[in-house]
Image (cartoon, rainbow, N blue to C red):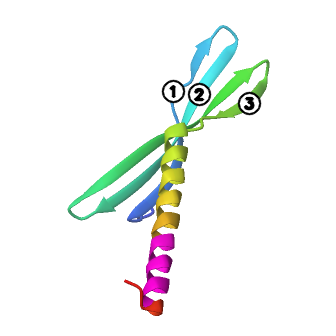
Amino acid sequence: MAQPEGIIRWQTLSGEPITVGDVTITPQSQALIIRLPFGGLVWNRPVAVLVEHGGQTRRMPIIDITRVVQLGLLGLNLAFAIFLVLSTRRKTKRGVK
């Protein structure tokens, strides 16, 4: 009997290997899968490339610069929001408006 699948799954998938000469390249991606009774969502992102050459396999990660910058900007926004909240609380405690 098959296992029932959960509502949320996070899995790493490998794509079709591509061979050129004696080098085989296999892309890898991560998928977030959300299944609901009325629909679902699948979000994929590349994470690495497996390179096989001479009997050795090397994993080369893919760094998503855009995502790194977005997370950095999110962190700066949160820090700025906390700074604004704390500075306005100090002013209202002192009676300055």
Residue 81 falls in image quadrant: bottom left
The magenta stretch spans which residues?
82-92
Most frequent secondary structure within the magenta stretch:
helix
Mark 3 or 1, which is nearer the eye? 3
Residue flagged by tag 2: what amino acid is it? Thr
* Proximity of marks 1 and 2: CB atoms separated by less than 8 Å: yes
Residue 62 falls in image quadrant: top right
Q: Earlier in the sequence, mark 3 or mark 2?
A: 2
State the SS at label 3. strand
Residue at coordinates 42% horizontally, 91% vertically from top-left? 95
Of all residues, the one furthest to the front in this rendering is: 96
Of the 4 image quadrants, the one containing the N terminus is bottom left
Q: Is residue 66 magenta?
A: no
Residue 26's disc number: 2
**Label 1, on which residue?**
16
State the SS at label 2. strand
Q: Is residue 62 left or right of residue 66?
A: right
State the SS at label 1. loop
- Return the residue nearer the eye: 12 or 65: 65
* Proximity of marks 3 and 2: CB atoms separated by less than 8 Å: no
Q: Find the distance from the CA under tag 1 to the CA under tag 2.
A: 6 Å
User: x, y (%) of residue 8?
Assistant: 42, 62
Of all residues, the one furthest to the left in this rendering is: 38
* Proximity of marks 3 and 1: CB atoms separated by less than 8 Å: no
